[in-house]
Amino acid sequence: MLFRFLDDFLEKRTNRLCGYGTFCRDYDHKRILLKRRKKSSLFKLSLGFYVGKEPWNFKILSLMNTSLTSLKQYGSLIKFSHTLFALPFAGIAFILAFLKTHGKSVLDWTILSILILFSMIFARSAAMGFNRIVDTGIDAQNERTQKREIPAGKISKRSAVLFVVLSSLGFFIASWFINPMTWRLSFPTLMILLGYSFSKRFTWLCHFILGFSIGLAPLATWVAIREEIVLEPILWTIGLAFNLAGFDILYALQDQDFDRKEGLYSIPAKFGRKNSLSIAIVSHVFCICFLFAAGIVSNLGPIFLIFLTVTGYLLFQEHKIARACGEDLFPAKFYRFHSYISLILFTGLLSDRIFYLAILGDNAYLR
């Protein structure tokens, strides 16, 4: 929506330079336009007063338009919108760890929140960019992925490599500023995130490797705040891992024939559509079980359990849609559908904590 607004703004702003969507290179033409728009000082300023030259601020608008296009392309390269799958789980871990941590000032929490957010963005950007680089040859042969940025030539491979390097450096720097434990674990964490890109070449368990890689978000957030690895964030991580693995199995159904042809490993290519749907269901059942266990260990109440029940219902509906679809059809609303699941769980936890803290005033319940 932001990109669409900026696109419209730049287009309208450029067209207003002379009122007809073209540049005013004639002095008389400029004079007439200035007379028509004499009440608009902004228009007079933007029109420019050099005959035969483009208005000076059109160059700025062109630069803004080019920068916006590049930003959109890189955002599409890393599927930035898909951060909604894991970010709410990081928020869950943040709230739980926050309630157990004392002695930090508002400024400390603000800085820590920003560092955690940036480290997540940098880590995901590096992982997705690296995946697109590694899979360039495969994407170029797959009709579904031929229009991705690197195969389509919108972003060069060299630029993508530079993007991954800078994102990795950003992740390391943010981790270093958080705490020593986060800094030490940043290296194996990035290796796991980057290593997923090769898993489809040797194991059909690649979906679960992906789930675990992205599922590290709540555990990493907990470590950033508490500097410890305990059962509570591990359960949230496993629940998220099974959630994403089940979704990725459904997503991979559309490439089932292509994966078999190219010798790539995936559960649909190995076991077929019917069995893959069953495996995805089992994965999501495990997801609900681990999230229930995480809620118990985190001492969450019935409000969270209500939201968890809603999550289970949505997953059930997702599988109904998947079974009703054809062999190669993957509804675009699946992405929206699945991002809602993470947001619903986050809302459930937040509502549960606010209820017991603000309404019942049960401070002991929060420890």
Image (tube, rainbow, N blue to C red):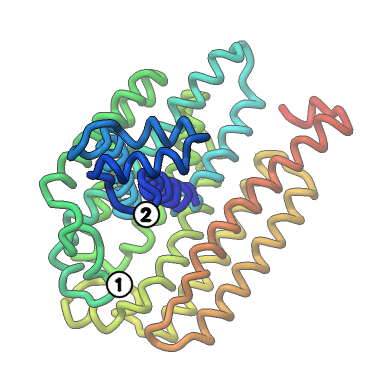
Residue, x 56% and y 19% (percent of image)? 109
User: Which quadrant would residue 170 be assigned to in this image?
Assistant: top left
Residue, x 22% and y 39% (percent of image)? 54
Across the whole image, how many numbered discs are drawn on residues?
2
Residue, x 34% and y 82% (percent of image)? 271
Q: Judge from the rendering whether residue 132 lies leftward or rightward of residue 209; answer left or right.
A: left
Q: Secondary structure at mark 1?
A: loop
Mark 2 residue type = Tyr
User: Which quadrant would residue 250 be assigned to in this image?
Assistant: bottom left
The dot on residue 20 is: 2
The dot on residue 353 is: none
Is residue 359 shown above or below 68?
Answer: above
Residue 213 visible, this orientation: no
Indicate the position of residue 197 as horizontal and vertical percent values: 24, 56
Mark 1 residue type = Ser
Q: Which residue is mark 1?
A: 266
Q: Judge from the rendering whether residue 311 lies leftward or rightward of residue 207; answer left or right.
A: right
Indicate the position of residue 313 as horizontal and vertical percent values: 67, 68
Indicate the position of residue 310 as horizontal and vertical percent values: 70, 62
213 and 358: which is toward the camera: 358
Is residue 87 shown above or below 94?
Answer: below
33 and 169: which is toward the camera: 33
Is residue 211 shown above or below 97?
Answer: below
343 and 151: which is toward the camera: 151
Q: Residues within 10 Å of mark 2 (few under 14, many from 20)?
A: few
Is residue 313 shown above or below 166?
Answer: below
Residue, x 36% and y 73% (percent of image)? 252
Q: Are marks 2 and 1 in contact (CB under 8 Å)?
A: no
Q: Secondary structure at mark 2?
A: loop
